Each structure stands twice: as C-alpha cells, then as structure tokens.
Image (tube, rainbow, N blue to C red):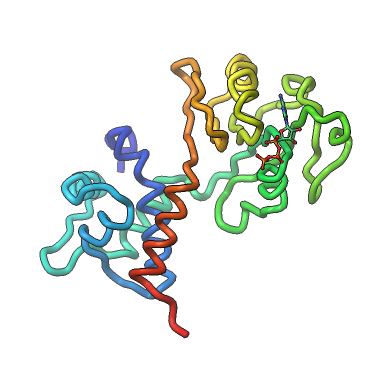
Amino acid sequence: MDQNKIPQATAKRLPLYYRFLNSLNHQGKKRVSSKELSDAVKVDSATIRRDFSYFGALGKKGYGYNVEYLLGFFRKTLDQDELTEVALIGVGNLGTAFLHYNFLKNNNTKIVMAFDADPEKPGTDIDGIPIYHIDDLEEKMGDVRVAILTVPSGEAQGITNRLADYGIEGILNFTPARITVPSGVRVHHIDLAIELQALVYFLKHYPLDG
Ligand code: ATP
C-alpha cells in the first residue's frame, strides 16, 4: 500500500485507532463496528468509514471490521519495526516518570538522552539515560530528531525555537503551552484529559472480568 495516498488527516488518526483496536484485541474481540469505534475515539462514523476505505478495509454491514486485519495494517503503516531515538527536555515529575518508563516494551521508540536547566541534574542518569544541561542541547543531540517536552509552560517556546533551529522533526508537547514552529516541524500535543476520558469509556463499556 502506498502510504503517500493516505491523507494527512487520516494518518494522524491512525495511532488513535491503533490503540483502541489493540485493547479490543487484548480482550479477545474479533470485530468492531464503526459505531463502537466512533464512540471510543470520538471521530464520527462517516469519517471512520472513509479513513478505513484507504486501508482497503471495507466494513461489512452487520459485521463491522476485522480487528486483526486492521491491526496488521496499522502495525506496518506506523513503522513499528524501526527504532527511533528520542530526547526528553525537562526532568521534573512527568519527565522523570517517562525516563523510568520503558517505551520499548510497547513501541520502537527509545529515550536516549535528557536535558534540564537545574544545575544539580546534569552528570547524573536515570535508568542509564544520561541527563545533560540544557545549555549543551545542540552539542549533545547528534542525530536525534524527535523530542518530548516536559518543561514548565513558560519555557516551552524558547526550547522549541532552539530545537527547530537544530533541525528537530517532531515534538511531543506535554506542556499546556501552544507552541509555534516552522512549517517543517510536526508538533503533537498530548491532552491527558482526553486520555482519561478514553479510560473511563473502557471502564464503562468493557468491564474486565473478575
Ligand atoms: P512536572 O510535573 O510538570 O514535571 P515539576 O514540578 O516537576 O513539574 P516543572 O517546574 O514543571 O517541575 O519543571 C519541569 C522540569 O523542567 C524541572 O526539572 C526543571 O528544572 C526543568 N526546566 C525548567 N526550565 C527549563 C529549561 N529552560 N530547560 C530545560 N529544563 C527546564
């Protein structure tokens, strides 16, 4: 399948679909209707049907979509086989939690370095991931092209400008700040409120046995 043929808006929804379908798969569900999907990922079912038609997945009336087929397709499309190195900026509470978290368990992404402005932190490491001073950002980044931002909101834009000048390609922004980037840089903003909403949906509609 030619990935370039998937519209950008559709591609952006892929991780949403992927995560939901993965949970269904873990629950042993073989199929899902576009209505169920729509309720879970908060995308209207007409859009879902159009998105899925790009993947060659045509839902059958009264049957829905085959979960395994879709997952197989998404795994390939989301490049789950390639390892991407990531830098984390801001080793506070949230940043520290991410450094302790082994992303490799679920994903092929790995945080390989972290930066902080606090003079106490550089020179130390967390679970083997070195922490450098933010002043050394450009010197240490090497080939890393993806960054996670967990700095205070007021610092987000300044750091973003430096990352953009360095040639960053993607930023996962966990700060509440809306950041501005040059056109070549992709920013994804994580809204923890939406994630929590999804969890509550699962608790309500897919209670665990026992
Ligand atoms: P959080 O839970 O959001 O991580 P926190 O209370 O642990 O909050 P914050 O004040 O949000 O800490 O700061 C997060 C981290 O970002 C801290 O470790 C702080 O030293 C670091 N930091 C602050 N300014 C900068 C900066 N300009 N560059 C890099 N790191 C910074």
Q: Position of residue 128 (x, y in %)?
A: 81, 47
Q: Work out whether residue 33 or residue 11 is closer to the camera in this orientation and state it.
A: 33
Residue with the most extreme bottom position: 210
**Residue at the spot 55% in from the left edge and 52% down from the top edge:** 107
Looking at the rendering, in which quadrant would you find the N terminus?
A: top left
* Vertical position of residue 93 compared to residue 136: above or below: below
* Quadrant observed for ligand 1 in the rendered image: top right
What residue do we see at 63% from left, 18% from top? 158
Count of numbered circles in the view: 0
Q: Position of residue 88 (x, y in %)?
A: 67, 36
Q: Nearer the viewer, residue 172 or 21?
A: 172
Left or right: 32 as drawn, with respect to 59: right
Give the residue drawn at x 75%, y 31%. 115
Residue 59 located left or right of residue 93: left
Residue 83 figure quarter: top right
Query: Can the viewer see residue 167 in this picture?
Result: no
Name of the residue lying farthest toward the left: 61
Q: Residue at x 50, y 47 (%)?
A: 192
**Residue 199 horizontal/vertical position (percent):** 44, 60
Whether residue 33 is visible, yes or no, is yes
Q: Is residue 45 left or right of residue 196?
A: left
- In the image shown, does 2 or 135 lie closer to the viewer? 135
* Position in image of residue 100 (x %, y %): 72, 52
115 versus 30 height, above or below: above
Which of the 4 image quarters holds residue 205? Answer: bottom left
